[in-house]
Image (spheres, rainbow, N blue to C red):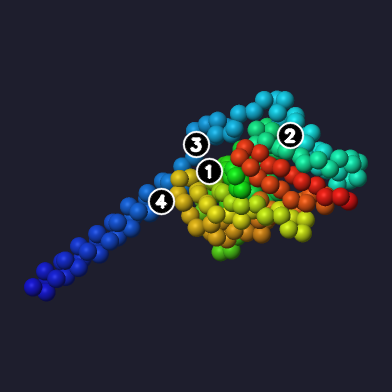
């Protein structure tokens, strides 16, 4: 009888361990998912749209430098911005992205792209794993996606993350700031030119509204 109870307990423990291993394997598979053709995920754009995106960003900087006295709203479409990013910018300062893709939705901005495991694990306590994991694994790229609302205060633009996905695995948004650390926070919070009063995000476009100097 005692042996029977012990045998049942052993089966329960083995079953639990098996469930944990299977669950961990599924989560790991989902996290390591990476699209075969990541550039195809980027919204389509023309060379003219990429150039217009560059010109509109330059106009914002010219206003801040006092070299342009225009104050009409600058409207940047997601096609124009993604065209500019594809041609001129492949990374943020804190976390290298390749590619880096932005989408505008009503009241929200979505960011997605490929980053290496090593660049993702910069924060405490995750950076301690960097010294323990094989270099080949640290160089492996994963696909991250995040969505959040835009907030402009005191010359800064902040993205308050509401959804965070690595590969196909949804994770708690607070885990993102913990993983990327202070350096990677440049992705979520950065300075704006002094002349920018607010940024309104609509479907497919962002409207940058200037203030008087």
Q: Please name the residue that numbered disc 1 is placed on.
A: 143
Q: Tell me the element at label 3.
A: loop
**Among numbered discs 3 and 4, the one appearing first in the sequence:** 4
Residue depicted at 68% across the width and 42% down the height: 206
- Label drawn at residue 35: 3
The residue sitting at 70% across, 25% down in the picture is 47
| Among numbered discs 1 and 4, the one appearing first in the sequence | 4
Q: Residue furthest right?
A: 67
* Mark closer to the chain start, 2 or 3: 3
Which residue carries the number 2 mark? 53
Mark in front: 2 vs 1 = 2
In the rendered image, residue 19, in percent from the top left (x then y), is placed at 30, 56
Does residue 2 appear left or right of residue 53 in this picture? left
Residue contact at pointers 1 and 3, CB within 8 angstroms: yes
- Residue 162 percent coordinates (x, y): 55, 54
In the image, is residue 49 above or below residue 167?
above
Task: Give the CA separation, mark 1 to mark 3.
Answer: 8 Å
Q: Earlier in the sequence, mark 1 or mark 3?
A: 3
Quarter of image, res 10: bottom left
Residue at point 81%, 40% (across, down): 72
The residues bearing labels 1 and 4 have C-alpha atoms spaced at a distance of 14 Å
């Amino acid at each position: 009888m005692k042996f029977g109870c012990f045998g049942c307990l052993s089966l329960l423990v083995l079953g639990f361990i098996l469930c944990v291993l299977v669950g961990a394997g599924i989560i790991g598979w989902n996290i390591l998912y990476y699209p075969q053709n990541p550039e195809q995920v980027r919204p389509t754009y023309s060379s003219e749209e990429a150039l217009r995106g560059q010109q509109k960003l330059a106009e914002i900087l010219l206003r801040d430098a006092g070299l342009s006295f225009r104050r009409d709203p600058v409207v940047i479409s997601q096609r124009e911005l993604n065209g500019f990013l594809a041609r001129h910018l492949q990374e943020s300062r804190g976390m290298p992205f390749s590619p880096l893709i932005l989408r505008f939705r009503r009241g929200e901005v979505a960011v997605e792209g490929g980053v290496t495991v090593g660049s993702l694990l910069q924060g405490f306590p995750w950076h301690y794993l960097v010294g323990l994991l094989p270099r080949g694994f640290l160089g492996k790229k994963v696909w991250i996606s995040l969505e959040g609302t835009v907030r402009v205060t005191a010359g800064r633009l902040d993205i308050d993350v509401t959804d965070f996905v690595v590969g196909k695995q949804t994770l708690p948004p607070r885990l993102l700031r913990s993983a990327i650390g202070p350096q990677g926070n440049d992705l979520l919070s950065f300075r704006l030119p002094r002349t920018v009063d607010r940024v309104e995000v609509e479907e497919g476009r962002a409207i940058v509204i200037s203030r008087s100097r």
